Image (cartoon, rainbow, N blue to C red):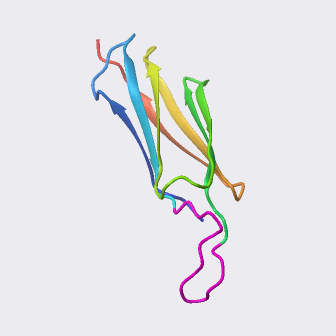
């Protein structure tokens, strides 16, 4: 639990208004399914995983993804978006525990 490290990457790094870019979001997360046993205690490790991810650009939802516990550790979520001026790109994710976190970056098109 607690604040998890996350990262938003845009490719290409330099983009102009009207271009479509690839947006990737990675979160450092164990993605526990609730089916793995702790080697020492032999008890099941409680389920704790990302179950939804929402990409928002300039206050408008680009896409929402529903996720299940079977994803790998430290998952990467990718979508595409069209650059439409400067603004904020925000990724909000919810965990199975109910905890909500977000990461944002400034979009600054060149030219």
- Which residue is located at x 66 percent, y 83 percent? 43
Residue 71, given in percent of the width and then of the height, sits at 53, 52
> Where 20 falls versus 45 (above or below)?
above
- Which residue is located at x 60 percent, y 45 percent? 93
Image quadrant holding the C terminus, namely: top left
Residue 66, given in percent of the width and then of the height, sits at 64, 40
Residue 105, given in percent of the width and then of the height, sits at 44, 35
User: In this view of the protein, which residue sits in the foreground, 30 or 71?
Assistant: 71
Decide whether residue 41 is among the magenta residues.
yes
Decide whether residue 100 is among the magenta residues.
no
- Which residue is located at x 49 percent, y 55 percent? 72
- Which residue is located at x 42 percent, y 37 percent? 24
- Total residue callouts: 0
> Where 40 falls versus 10 (above or below)?
below
Image quadrant holding the N terminus, namely: bottom right
In this view, which residue lies farthest toward the bottom?
A: 40
Horizontally, residue 20 falls left or right of residue 68, namely left
Residue 109, given in percent of the width and then of the height, sits at 35, 19
> Where 82 falls versus 57 (above or below)?
above
**What's the magenta region?**
30-45
Q: Looking at the magenta stretch, what is its main secondary structure?
A: loop
């Amino acid at each position: 639990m607690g604040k998890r490290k996350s990262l938003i990457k845009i490719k290409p790094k330099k983009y102009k208004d009207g271009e479509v870019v690839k947006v990737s979001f990675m979160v450092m997360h164990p993605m526990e399914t609730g089916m793995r046993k702790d080697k020492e205690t032999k008890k099941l490790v409680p389920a704790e995983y990302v179950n939804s991810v929402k990409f928002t650009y300039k206050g408008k939802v680009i896409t929402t993804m529903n996720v299940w516990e079977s994803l790998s550790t430290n998952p990467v979520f990718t979508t595409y978006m069209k650059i439409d001026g400067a603004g904020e790109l925000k990724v909000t994710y919810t965990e199975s525990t109910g905890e909500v976190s977000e990461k944002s970056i400034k979009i600054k098109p060149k030219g």
